[in-house]
Structure formats: C-alpha cells, structure tokens
Amino acid sequence: MAAHGVRRISKQLTSRRSFSNPIRIIGFNTAERWSEDVSEDIAHEMQRRCDLQQIEVPASLEAFVDRHTGGRQQLTLRLV
C-alpha cells in the first residue's frame, strides 16, 4: 500500500473521530484487483505519529497497536 495511504488512514484513526477498537485494516485496490492486510503498517505509523507528537496512543487504539507491533516501540526523536 502506498505510504500516503498509510499516513492518511493512521491520521484518521488517531484523530478520534473515526473508529474505536479496530481488529484489522485491509487495503483494497480494485483497479489492480488485490487486497492486503495493512494492519501492521498502520499500527507502526500510528505509533510513530504519537511519538512525534509526544502523546500516548489513544486508549481505543492501544490494543490494536500492541497487537500489530508486538508491543515493540521504536523511539522517534524530534529534531529541532
């Protein structure tokens, strides 16, 4: 799945307006006739965004992120 799609979806999920307690996220490309589980990519991007903003992953997404990142967190340092 394209990087911009992953960023857009993770932004929608962390905005707290969309979904709560997601199980899995599937990306579809009907033009090319494929679908793919993008849960791991989305979980890593959500964790990265929260790290950059120095905020916790929203409680409604915490289980999803832990499940798809294996509880591993890569620390991201903000350059100023």
Image (spheres, grey):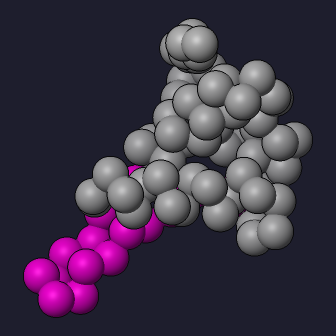
Q: Nearer the viewer, residue 9 or 21?
A: 9
x, y (%) of residue 15? 76, 58
Point 32% across, 76% down: residue: 28
* Image quadrant in which the C terminus is located: top right
> From this viewpoint, is residue 67 visible?
no
Q: Quadrant of residue 34?
A: bottom left
Q: Is residue 73 above or below residue 15?
A: above
Q: Tell which residue pokes out farthest to the left in this image.
A: 32
x, y (%) of residue 37? 37, 58
x, y (%) of residue 32? 12, 82
Q: Tell which residue pokes out farthest to the front in this image.
A: 80
Q: Judge from the rendering whether residue 67 lies leftward or rightward of residue 59; answer left or right.
A: left
x, y (%) of residue 50? 69, 33
Residue 73 in magenta stretch: no
> From this viewpoint, is residue 21 visible?
yes
Residue 31 in magenta stretch: yes
Point 75% across, 46% down: residue: 61
Q: Is residue 62 above or below residue 9?
A: above
Point 81% across, 29% down: residue: 56
Q: Nearer the viewer, residue 58 or 69?
A: 58
* Image quadrant in which the N terminus is located: bottom left
Point 77% across, 35% down: residue: 57
Residue span colored magenta: 22-38
Q: Is residue 48 above or below residue 35?
A: above
Q: Tell which residue pokes out farthest to the right in this image.
A: 59
